[in-house]
Image (tube, rainbow, N blue to C red):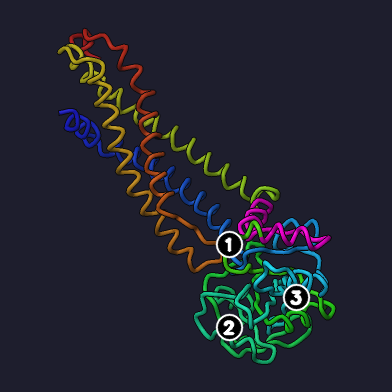
């Protein structure tokens, strides 16, 4: 009976129901997309680190994020390699560079160089070619998302990086850069040649421990032995880079504030609509009270009414957000919507609508049952 009364109250006025659902859908889409952008940016920021295959990263002192670091010298490589806990060490380069397009215009890129004979720090998600193609003379790998941005039309195109020739030999999919400067992968020698580093210089050391050696123990061993460097496990370096770009620069804070504002706006719209709907049926609620219905019964009707609105609005909103997320897979900004977020949004939507309904209940609870005999 409670469900039937609540459903009839909602669907009696279709226009008002549409207004209510519009407010809920707007809030769900805005909050979900903003949080999805936040998660997408977080994933993008540390994607190269997370997919590096390394246990530990050795950096120059004071490094704040993955994208900017001072070079290390060859001596550090041998100091790390000499440790008994170390299985393999790979040199790694990341530097900003200028990319000259066929039309003469320039784009900023981040060139990544790694040792192609070691399984650490290289590209992934190949759609054309493979990592072996980097062994070709001046070979580089770019992501197909940036082909138009970089003026590349096909594999084999010759390009110019810092006034030196290179050739696109493979394509990946979904390797985005947070800095808007696309990642360009190359062998260590090619990257060094295109970034003006001195022979033997590199940006990071990627370290893999021997079987049975946990990353924390490997990190401690390197920190004790090698001076004037910082040492991080891969999760630590990933978190450090994420924290820097998302909070030190304010980018992440802006997204979270926008999501909070979406929640506030959605609650206001839903509260106003549910309150107006309740007032439209105030005589009916007065009739129920005159018939002896307890306050808990009235509470139940209005809360069930709010829950139905929440489920309908959530279903439409999460569908719209999912479509937007799928479309973002082909753009430079990805929106990540894990199942955990979708379930959390269901709970948040229910809470938002029920809290809004509770606000409207207060007037109903003060009703005089005699109102049914007096008219509105």
Left or right of 195 on screen, residue 85: left
The reply to whether residue 23 is in sight is yes
The front one of 14 and 135 is: 135
Does the segment drawn in magenta span residue 223?
A: yes
Left or right of 189 on screen, residue 269: left
Disc 3 is placed on an element classified as: strand
Image quadrant where residue 103 sits: bottom right
The front one of 258 and 164 is: 164
Which x, y percent locates residue 101?
69, 81
Q: Answer few, some or many: residues within 10 Å of disc 2's Cα (few below 14, many 20 plus, some between 14 and 19).
A: many
Is 317 above or below relative to 20? below
- State how far apart marks 3 and 2 are (Cα): 23 Å
Is 18 above or below relative to 304? below
Which x, y percent locates residue 165?
73, 88
- In terms of sequence position, does the residue under pointer 3 or pointer 1 come before the other? 1
Of circles 3 and 2, the one toward us is 2
Q: Please identify the dominant SS of the magenta region.
A: helix
The front one of 364 and 3 is: 3
Of circles 3 and 1, the one toward us is 1
Report the residue marked by disc 1. Answer: 44
The stretch of residues the image draws in magenta is 218-245
């Amino acid at each position: 009976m409670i469900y039937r009364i609540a459903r009839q109250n909602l669907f009696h006025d279709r226009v008002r129901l549409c207004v209510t659902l519009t407010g809920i859908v707007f809030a769900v889409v805005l909050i979900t997309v903003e949080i999805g952008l936040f998660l997408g940016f977080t994933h993008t920021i540390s994607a190269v680190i997370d997919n590096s295959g390394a246990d530990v990263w050795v950096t120059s002192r004071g490094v704040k994020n993955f994208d900017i670091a001072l070079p290390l010298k060859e001596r550090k490589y041998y100091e790390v390699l000499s440790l008994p806990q170390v299985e393999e060490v790979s040199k790694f380069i990341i530097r900003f560079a200028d990319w000259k397009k066929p039309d003469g215009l320039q784009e900023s890129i981040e060139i990544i160089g790694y040792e192609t004979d070691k399984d650490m720090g290289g590209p992934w998600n190949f759609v054309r070619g493979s990592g072996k193609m980097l062994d070709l003379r001046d070979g580089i790998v770019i992501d197909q998302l940036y082909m138009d941005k970089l003026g590349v039309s096909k594999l084999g195109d010759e390009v110019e990086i810092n006034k030196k020739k290179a050739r696109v030999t493979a394509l990946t999919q979904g390797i985005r850069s947070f800095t808007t400067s696309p990642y360009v992968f190359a062998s260590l020698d090619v990257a060094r040649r295109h970034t003006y580093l001195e022979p033997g210089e590199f940006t990071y050391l990627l370290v893999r421990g021997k079987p049975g050696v946990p990353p924390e123990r490997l990190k401690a061993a390197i920190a004790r032995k090698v001076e004037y460097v910082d040492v991080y496990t891969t999760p630590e370096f990933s978190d450090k880079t994420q924290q820097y770009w998302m909070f030190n620069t304010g980018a992440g804070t802006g997204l979270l504030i926008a999501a909070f504002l979406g929640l506030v706006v959605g609650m206001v719209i839903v509260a106003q609509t549910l309150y107006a709907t309740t007032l439209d049926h105030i005589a009916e609620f007065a009739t129920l009270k005159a018939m002896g219905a307890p306050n808990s019964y009235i509470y139940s009707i209005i809360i069930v009414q709010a829950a139905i609105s929440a489920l309908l609005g959530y279903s439409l909103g999460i569908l719209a957000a999912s479509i937007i997320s799928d479309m973002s897979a082909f753009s430079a900004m990805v929106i990540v919507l894990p199942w955990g977020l979708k379930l959390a949004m269901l709970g948040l939507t229910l809470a938002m609508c029920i809290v809004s309904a509770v606000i409207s209940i207060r007037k109903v609870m003060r009703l005089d049952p005699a109102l049914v005999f007096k008219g509105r």
